[in-house]
Image: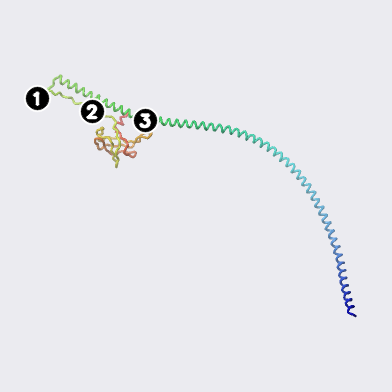
Amino acid sequence: MSVLTKVFTILLVLLSVVLSAFTVAAFSQQENWKASASDWREAALAEQAKSRSIAANAALESQNALARHLSDLDEINKIKAEVADKERSLAKLESDYAAAQNQLSVEQSTVNSTSEHNKLLENARNRDGEFIAKLSRRNSELERLNVDLNDRVKELTSSVAMAQSQIRALRQQIETMSGDQIAGVTQIPGSSGVQTGIPSVAPSSARPIVTSPIRGEVTEVKDGLASISVGSTDGVAEGMTFLLYRPGVSGSKPLYLGTLRVTRVEANNCAGTLETTEGQVQPGDLARDEASFALRG
């Protein structure tokens, strides 16, 4: 065989093999299409069944939704009715609130006027209190003046009593002297040592006790001793007791501090021991004899 024949034969064999393969592939492809078509048909039927089920479910759901919608509409209508009632109640409450606001304004005006009236009353009460305080201070001053006046009256009364006593004593002396002169009473020289012609004078009566108060001021305080600014020329004697006190402030009562018993007396001052103390005695505090204080009316 020639070479060309061999090549042609090989080509025919190859073409036969390719054609056989193509035929087998076409046949197998045709079988696959049938199976696919059957599958597609079954899938379509399943989808149709599924669609019918979905449509039925959708219809049922639609009916349920419609029922719910109707129920919701009823509920909405009820809510609208309740809202209308609430709005009417709110309108009534707003009206009541406006009336209450007006009433509150009226009451506030009344409270303000009452507060102003109370302020006026408070100012009047303060003025009355100040006036009462002034009257109290004036009363205290008048009481002190009354005490001093009573003391002065007692002094004058004592002075009058002393003067009357001295007058009575002088009258007795005058009467005695007149009686002796009229009777011509004389004694013989050398008999009793009394000169002739000299009338005998009756002894005067005892001097009355001076009850006028003795007032002084504390000048020094040291170690339980104190000195005051009055002495023998003022009638101070050893053993006298003085009351020590401090004057009150703004009409208040004096503050009692204690007592002083005189142990040393000079012309214009005296000193003694502090027997009782109820406060701290200082220079400048006042002193008054206890005897005249006890005789106060």
The C terminus: image quadrant: top left
| Horizontal and vertical percent position of residue 122 | 48, 32
Which of the numbered marks, if any, corresponds to residue 216? Answer: none
- Residue tagged by mark 3? 141
- Residue tagged by mark 1? 189
In space, the residues marked 1 and 2 are separated at their CA atoms by 35 Å
Amino acid under label 1?
Answer: Pro
Amino acid under label 3?
Answer: Glu
Of pointers 2 and 3, the one earlier in the residue sequence:
3
Q: Residues within 10 Å of mark 1 (few under 14, many from 20)?
A: few
Identify which residue, 294 or 197, lies in the foreground: 197
Q: Is residue 51 above or below residue 235?
A: below
Q: Is residue 225 above or below residue 207?
A: below
Locate residue 282: give its quadrant.
top left
- Residue tagged by mark 2? 207
Locate residue 258: give its quadrant.
top left
SS of the residue under disc 3: helix
SS of the residue under disc 1: loop
| Horizontal and vertical percent position of residue 46 | 82, 56
Q: Is residue 62 above or below residue 217?
A: below
Which residue is outermost to the bottom?
1
Locate residue 275: give its quadrant.
top left
In the rendered structure, the answer to whether residue 269 lies left or right of residue 176 reads right
